[in-house]
Image: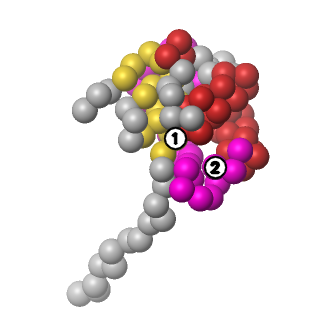
Amino acid sequence: MTEVIKPTMMDYHRYILVCIGNKCTENGEGQNLYNELKIKLKAAGLDKGELRVKRNKVTCFGTCTSGPLLCVQPDGIWYYDINSAKLDRIIDEHFIQGKPVLEYIHHHNQG
């Protein structure tokens, strides 16, 4: 029997899940936001160091409305209807300063 090797993973301060599904956006806005997030995280220095952020894409969160959606873990924050300007504010206020942007949150899983 082949031995299963335990995977390793780098430490990240936050994990950002971006919905790229086609049911909550009409024109691929989720994928565009995912691509833009990579550039903006690097520009903000969040691609390394103690505030390092890992981004991943998912095809559906099951909400199917008001996308693009971002899920920020381990904070349990769900942002909706995110565009480039809102993303800038989330990166600055939430990811760097540690203060979630309340008016963009549609759900907060506290637990």
Within 10 Å of disc 1 (Cα), the crowding (few <14, some 14-19, many 20+) is many
Count up the numbered dots.
Answer: 2
Q: Is residue 49 left or right of residue 15?
A: right
- Residues 99 and 43: in front is 99
For the N terminus, the image quarter is: bottom left
Q: What residue is drawn where x is 48% and y is 65%?
A: 10
Q: Mark 1 or mark 2, which has the lower sequence index?
A: 1
Which residues are the magenta region?
A: 44-68
Mark 1 or 2: the one toward you: 2
Q: Main secondary structure of the magenta part?
A: loop
Q: Amino acid at mark 2?
A: Leu
Rendered location of residue 103, percent (x, y)? 53, 12
Q: Is residue 22 visible?
A: no
Q: Is residue 84 left or right of residue 111?
A: right
Which quadrant holds residue 49?
A: bottom right
Q: Is residue 78 left or right of residue 68?
A: left
Q: Is residue 86 highlighted in magenta?
A: no
The numbered mark at residue 16 is 1
Q: What residue is drawn where x is 32% and y is 27%?
A: 109
- Residues 16 and 46: in front is 46
Eyeballing the image, is 2 above or below 60? below
The numbered mark at residue 46 is 2
Rendered location of residue 76, percent (x, y)? 38, 32
